[in-house]
Image: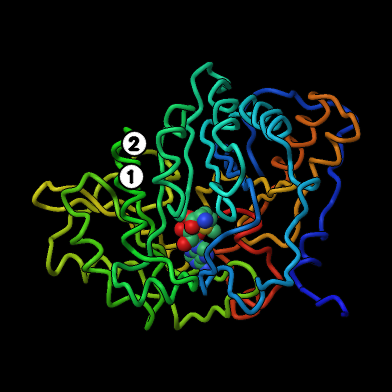
Amino acid sequence: MTAKVIPLVDQRTANRVPVIPAHALSPVGALADTRGRLMRDLRISVTDRCNFRCTYCMPKEIFDKDYQFLPQTELLSFEEITRLTRLFAAHGVNKIRLTGGEPLLRKNLEVLIEMLAALKTHEGKPLDLTLTTNASLLAKKAKALKAAGLQRVTVSLDSLDEAVFRAMNDVDFPVADVIKGIDAAHDAGFTAIKINMVVKKGVNDQDIVAMARRFKGSGHIVRFIEFMDVGASNGWRMNDVVPSAEIVRMISAEMPLIEAEPNYTGEVAERWAYADGSGEIGVISSVTQAFCSTCTRARLSTEGKLYTCLFAQSGHDLRTLMRSGKSDEKIASAIGLIWNQREDRYSEIRTEETVRTKKIEMSYIGG
Ligand code: SAM
């Protein structure tokens, strides 16, 4: 049988081995890019595999049984992830989000969490350690994750309507099992759990208000995300996007909302509080109100490439530096140079043309 040609493989190999500056940059201290944006957050993809086939993220037609996921030897080991995280933390990163693929599919993830929880920020504080999951394995793992030192959890849930949710995850996964995962996380001691709903017009926008209603007063925070043109496989069209402003209007018509101050500069979600004091929602408007100007996020792919934008077309191969025996100082110096040269602001310059470029897939780079 001839091997199936998969366009994503090309993207994954479109990478560069980073340049190590001749005059070493300081391996510690905050890094600013060409637009003065500091590096503060690191999203780490711990696996490119997922047990869901969300139609807007890992459509079955591409991620089918012939799709070549990365072999185990290609993945960064827990030691490699921890080493890089320590170098990023020395450069000012204070927030880590583990993602994927589905991060809970990575074996013994709690061991990695324990290793990361032992690291400190440049100021000597613990890192803010969070995880994004589809919750399919959360009921089983919540306690162990909490015990290992995970601080916060974000759960993805695109609809409370059984038929809509099952069609969107495309593996017939029931809503009730996601709710069980959320409840288990709550019982394990996680608070203010965030619940991400990606809104796609004509698919689940009729469920927006029901979602807000369901979690109002629960202490959890639903965040409505505009459908984005990440990757090259989800057939994105501007017409599929429901603008956040409209989402806020729809919810506010039934449950009045008041705009709330951001928790910190560069927060991705815009916060809206219920006027009756029963909690808040968030909206993430990466299409209609780009937030590139305050973007402090770096991304580490499953096999160790550093991406400076979710919409990047290629990454910087840190794994090669590690596996060829480069010192911490040299790798930290290379990371410094990459961030110093960062210019990305994709969402501000999105056009019909850029939408069609071969961007890296979200399941690979990490959401
Ligand atoms: N498997 C985990 C999960 O389901 O949360 C983590 C990875 S997933 C790629 C991370 C987040 O990205 C999810 O909340 C998902 O809904 C969101 N996402 C994926 N593709 C997206 C797109 N095209 N636009 C907006 N959000 C997207």
Instruction: Report the residue marked by disc 1.
Output: 193
Q: Secondary structure at mark 1?
A: loop
Name which residue type carries label 2.
Phe
User: Which image quarter is the N terminus in?
Assistant: bottom right
Front position in the image: 263 or 358: 358
> Furthest residue to the left?
276
Q: Secondary structure at mark 2?
A: loop
Front position in the image: 175 or 229: 175
Q: Is residue 50 above or below residue 107?
A: below
Instruction: Report the residue marked by disc 2.
Output: 190
Question: Is residue 255 rendered to the left or right of residue 76?
Answer: left
Q: Residue at x 52, y 72 (%)?
A: 56
User: Which image quarter is the C terminus in?
Assistant: bottom right
Q: Is residue 329 above or below residue 144?
A: above
Front position in the image: 255 or 161: 161
What is the distance, in whole Å, between disc 1 and disc 2 at their CAs? Answer: 7 Å
Asked if labels 2 and 1 touch by Cβ distance under 8 angstroms, the answer is: yes
Q: What colouring method underlies this structural image?
A: rainbow
Q: Is mark 1 within 8 Å of ligand 1?
A: no
Residue 217 in sight: yes
Q: Is residue 109 above or below residue 197?
A: above
Q: x, y (%) of residue 301?
A: 68, 49
> Which quadrant of the view contains residue 229?
bottom right
Name which residue type carries label 1.
Ile
Report crowding for label 2: few under 14, some 14 to 19, many 20 or more residues within 10 A (C-alpha).
Answer: many
Q: Residue at x 35, y 54 (%)?
A: 195
> Which quadrant of the view contains residue 352?
bottom right
Q: Which mark is residue 124?
A: none
Q: Residue at x 50, y 48 (%)?
A: 294
